[in-house]
Amino acid sequence: MMKRIGLCFVLVILLAFSIAFAQEDHEMDMLKPKQEYNEMEMLKPKKEEVKTEFPLGYPFTSWGEITQTPIGHDETGFKIDGYIEQGVDWFKVFNTDWKFNTFVALRGTAATHQIDYFNNKIGPWAGFKFKKTFDFGNDNSGSLYLGVRWEYYHYLDSGPPEKIDHHLFFTSIRDDNRLTFFLQWSFGGDWKKKSNQDNKEK
């Protein structure tokens, strides 16, 4: 009987010590700095934040050409033709690859053959368009544009009166205002690179 009481007494003491140590460990954990927790949080992969850029970009483009035509009935002689455009891509249309763009531009041409009045003019453009670019790989790409623009021209040399087209938008014999709807496309690439890629896939 005494042995059982002694064994129970020992078990109670051991249980009390276990509870005491457990409580102490718990209090020590509560007192620990949160450095370890913060380090674990830093090791977790962070969710990528989706940032919506506005505007999407400021695209610009320009082109030009200088020609000399010694033989021909029309547009003979020396001619300079050029265009420069600055635009803003504002947003994607319904989260597609189509972008809404507004732009201003300057178009001009000058020729030594003064009778061709349409080759001696300069003026600003302004408008908006929907644009989409295509990437077919292997340097094969393309672009598609659909939009509306206003064009103003000042003719540097009007030419003979019978050559002038007096339509509704003319403000004078040397000025012209136009409203133009347009659809443009441009596609290109390298057939050799495409054929090489096709051979690799076989």
Image (cartoon, rainbow, N blue to C red):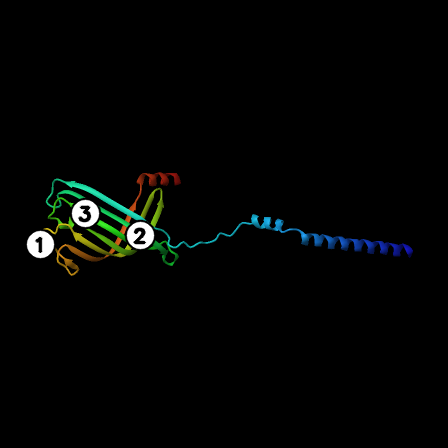
Residue 98 shows up from this direction? no
Label 2, label 3: how far apart the Cα atoms are = 21 Å
Q: CA distance from mark 2 to mark 1?
A: 37 Å
- Mark 1 neighbour class, 10 Å CA radius: few under 14, some 14 to 19, many 20 or more: few
Q: Residues within 10 Å of mark 3 (few under 14, many from 20)?
A: many
Name the residue rendered at 34%, 42% in the picture. 139
Residue in the picture at 28% in, 55% down: 146
At which x and y percent is residue 83? 24, 48
Q: Quadrant of residue 197?
A: top left
Which residue is identified by label 2? 87
How far apart marks 3 and 1 lie (CA) works out to: 20 Å
Sequence order check, earlier mark of 2 and 1: 2
- The kind of residue tagged 2 is Gly
Q: What quarter of the picture does the C terminus occupy?
A: top left
Mark 1 — residue?
A: 161
- Identify the residue shown where x is 59% and y is 50%: 38
Mark sitting on residue 109: 3
